[in-house]
Image: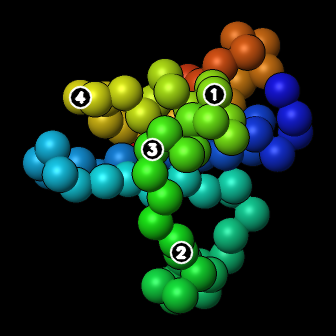
């Protein structure tokens, strides 16, 4: 897995099945995240095609916040 994929953090605030989440690299500043122009919308299948490991946290019904763990070679849930 590439180092860029390892640094992804996924945070979901799904309040309904139609709500989404956000994927961060972890290097964003607060100013970056406060500017809606810095975000783009992508289909989940597009994200999973680029980084297949995201499938474990982008599955239907999965909510929370995760970060990559090298030791487990997968995402682990983190406290928000």
Provide residue 29's location: percent of width, then percent of height: 67, 76
Mark 3–mark 2 distance (CA, rounded to whole Å):
15 Å
Mark 2–mark 1 distance (CA, rounded to whole Å):
21 Å
Q: Are marks 3 and 1 in contact (CB under 8 Å)?
A: no
The residue pinned by badge 4 equals 61
Q: Is residue 57 visible?
A: yes
Q: Helix, strand or loop at disc 3?
A: helix
Q: Helix, strand or loop at disc 4?
A: loop
Q: Helix, strand or loop at disc 1?
A: helix
Q: Are marks 1 and 4 in contact (CB under 8 Å)?
A: no
The residue pinned by badge 2 equals 39
Work out whether residue 37 or residue 48 is closer to the camera in this orientation and state it.
48
Residue at 63% x, 26% y: name it.
53
* Closer mark to the observer between disc 3 and disc 2: 3
How many other residues sit within 10 Å of disc 1, few (<14), some (14-19) or many (≥20)? Answer: few
Q: Report the residue that reaches farthest toward the left.
A: 16
* Closer mark to the observer between disc 2 and disc 1: 1
Q: Report the residue that reaches farthest toward the right.
A: 3
Residue at 59% x, 81% y: name it.
38
Q: Is residue 14 above or below residue 68?
A: below
- The number of numbered discs placed on residues in the rendered structure image is 4
The residue pinned by badge 3 equals 44
The quarter of the displayed image where residue 79 is located: top left
Mark 3–mark 1 distance (CA, rounded to whole Å):
11 Å
Provide residue 73's location: percent of width, then percent of height: 73, 15
Provide residue 61's location: percent of width, then percent of height: 23, 28
């Amino acid at each position: 897995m590439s180092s860029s994929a390892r640094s992804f953090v996924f945070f979901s605030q799904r309040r309904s099945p139609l709500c989404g989440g956000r994927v961060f690299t972890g290097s964003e500043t607060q100013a970056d995240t406060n500017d809606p122009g810095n975000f783009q919308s992508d289909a989940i299948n597009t994200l999973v095609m680029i980084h297949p490991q995201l499938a474990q946290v982008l599955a239907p019904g999965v909510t929370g916040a995760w970060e990559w763990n090298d030791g487990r070679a997968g995402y682990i849930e983190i406290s928000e």
